[in-house]
Amino acid sequence: HDIKPSFAEQLYDILESEEHDDVLQWTPDGSAFFVVDQKKFCLKKMSILFNIRNMSSFVRKLCRWGFSRLHPNDSNKDVFVHPDFVRGDRTRARKKVKCVGRLLAAGSLRGK
């Protein structure tokens, strides 16, 4: 049986695919990723790629998987980072990026 890729693996593969770089891209140093075009991502690709319908659900899922949301001063883009989710190391993402669950994720959102 083929093992279904985890959310982290799916996200990694999407970021590595040029087919979707109109909506999601790695940061130049590969330490994080960002949403290029939120409107297009939400309307055209999110439901197909992740079976998610809106940005807040996508952000909640990322938080459940241990990602942090950044708002760089020089950008109006949402940037998401995880210490073990980096360009060029899919194995590390597969082994280290795990769903931390709803309770832990809710705690990380409460401070906002």
Image (tube, rainbow, N blue to C red):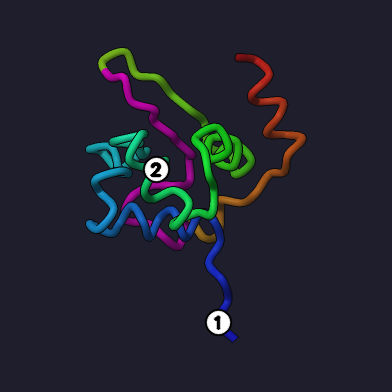
Extent of the magenta region: 75-92
Rendered position, 65 above or below 60: below
- Identify which residue, 39 or 63, lies in the foreground: 39
Task: Please state the horizontal and vertical placement of residue 30, each as a whole percent of the image.
Answer: 30, 43
Q: Is residue 57 left or right of residue 46?
A: right
Residue 96 to residue 108: above or below: below
Q: Is residue 103 magenta?
A: no
Identity, as a three-letter code, of the amino acid under mark 1:
Asp
- Mark 2: give few (<14), some (14-19) or many (20+) Cα within 10 Å: few
Looking at the rendered structure, the secondary structure element under dot 2 is helix
Distance in Å between CA atoms under marks 2 and 1: 30 Å
Would residue 80 be counted in the magenta stretch?
A: yes
- Point 38% across, 50% down: residue: 45
Q: Main secondary structure of the magenta part?
A: loop
Residue 10 in picture, x, y percent from top left:
46, 59
Give, as a three-letter code, the residue at label 2.
Answer: Leu
For label 2, the residue is 43
Q: What residue appears at the point 68 percent right and 44 percent down from the top-left corner? A: 100
Picture residue at 28% right of the left edge, 37% below the top? 27
Residue 90 spot, x, y in % from top left? 41, 60
Q: Quadrant of the C terminus?
A: top right
Nearer to us of marks 2 and 1 is 2
Residue 58 pos. (x, y %)? 53, 40
Instruction: State the residue lying farthest toward the bottom.
Output: 1
Q: Which residue is mark 1?
A: 2
Instruction: Say which quarter of the image contains residue 101.
Output: top right
Label 1 secondary element: loop
Q: Is residue 31 left or right of residue 67?
A: left
For the image, the number of numbered tags is: 2
